[in-house]
Image: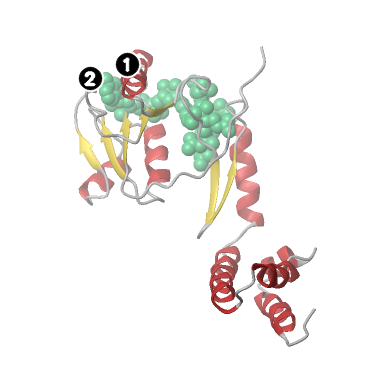
Amino acid sequence: MAKDTYFPICLRMKGRLCTVVGGGSVAERKIRSLMDTDARIKVIAPRWTPAITKWIDEGLVLGESRVYRDGDLKGSFIVYASTDVPSVNEQVCLEAEQEGMMFNRSDQADTGDWVDPAVVRRGQLAITVSTGGASPGMAKAIQCELQQEYGPEFEEALDWLAGLRVTLKETLADPRDRQRILKELWTEDTIDQIRNGELHKLKQKIAVALEPGGK
Ligand SMILES: C[C@@]1(CC(=O)O)c2cc3[nH]c(cc4nc(cc5[nH]c(cc(n2)[C@H]1CCC(=O)O)[C@@](C)(CC(=O)O)[C@@H]5CCC(=O)O)C(CC(=O)O)=C4CCC(=O)O)c(CCC(=O)O)c3CC(=O)O
Ligand SMILES: NC(=O)C1=CN([C@@H]2O[C@H](COP(=O)(O)OP(=O)(O)OC[C@H]3O[C@@H](n4cnc5c(N)ncnc54)[C@H](O)[C@@H]3O)[C@@H](O)[C@H]2O)C=CC1
């Protein structure tokens, strides 16, 4: 049978309620990932890991210390069914489906609305890897490689690029002018220059392009 092809998008999570049912190592990983965003996070489980306990104590996560009950998902934007009991996960997914909420089922790759990718974050840069459930181990291995290849210098470079874009929008009225200048940046060696911490070389390219009569 043909495999599903998943559609990658980046969701805006600010203020949205995400409910995680289950409090084990998988739930912990899902919550850790949600905590990179400004989502509101609720976890429902009779027992949870020390890391989850700490987040609840710190007020970063709302904890309901009990088994899942029908109706628990009220108000959720997205839902994780992440217990180690398949019949419970099934119930959670059923409620989510009835309520029209998107859900992820941790114990079944091909059930649910999405699968989580492995992510490397460098500030606003998010590099995601997905094998669509075929091999989470491979996704993780590629994530480890990308972590080495794309270090913290990419966060700094992206901050600068974002600022540059804002400035150009403010100072150059014609979008074609902005595009011409920004295209000058992206030559074969730009990524290596960022990697080598040579942001000044990017700044130089922009300065040249901005000169009167510049390229
Ligand atoms: C479908 C998916 C659903 C979902 O969770 O969204 C899913 C499902 C399952 N994972 C299983 C096993 C493992 N998962 C990991 C690791 C990660 N799993 C993640 C995502 C996903 N896992 C989604 C698909 C992603 C994709 O394919 O690209 C990552 C990328 C992100 C994250 O979880 O946030 C995170 C790595 C990144 C990180 O750590 O940051 C490891 C490796 C390890 O832990 O070292 C193992 C053991 C090795 C192995 O099996 O390869 C099992 C089998 C359980 C069993 O055998 O019983 C199932 C259930 C099934 O296959 O049905
Ligand atoms: N998506 C992924 O990356 C992976 C998924 N899995 C799958 O995810 C499942 C969970 O894995 P772990 O977190 O390692 O299990 P775990 O055993 O560490 O944690 C299970 C959690 O579910 C809670 N729970 C049990 N019954 C519940 C109920 N009725 N209501 C609410 N919470 C309940 C437990 O209190 C516990 O917090 C595994 O069974 C496996 O099938 C496993 C490895 C990776």
What residue lies at 74% left-to-right and 65% top-to-bottom? 186
Circles 1 and 2 in contact, beta carbons < 8 Å: yes
Q: Which quadrant of the view contains residue 88? A: top left
- Relative placement, left or right, of 205 versus 85 is right
Tell whether circle 1 marks a residue whose Cβ is less than 8 angstroms from ligand 2.
Answer: no
Residue nearest the viewer, comparing 54 with 66: 66
Q: Which mark is residue 120?
A: none
Residue 43 locus on image (x, y percent):
27, 35
Q: Name the residue that disc number 2 marks.
A: 70
Mark 1, secondary structure of its residue? helix
- Relative placement, left or right, of 84 versus 73 is right
Tell whether circle 2 marks a residue whose Cβ is less than 8 angstroms from ligand 2.
Answer: no
Q: Which mark is residue 91?
A: 1
Q: Earlier in the sequence, mark 1 or mark 2?
A: 2
Residue 163 locus on image (x, y percent):
54, 72
Q: Is residue 136 visible?
A: no
Question: Quick one: label 1, few (<14), some, or many (20+) residues within 10 Å?
Answer: some
Tell which residue pokes out farthest to the bottom in this image: 212
Residue nearest the viewer, comparing 92 with 146: 92
Residue type pointed to by label 1 = Gln
Residue nearest the viewer, comparing 58 with 78: 78
Residue type pointed to by label 2 = Asp
Q: Which quadrant of the view contains residue 78? A: top left
Residue 83 locus on image (x, y percent):
35, 24
Question: Quick one: label 2, few (<14), some, or many (20+) residues within 10 Å?
Answer: few
- Relative placement, left or right, of 203 versus 66 is right
Q: CA distance from mark 1 to mark 2?
A: 8 Å
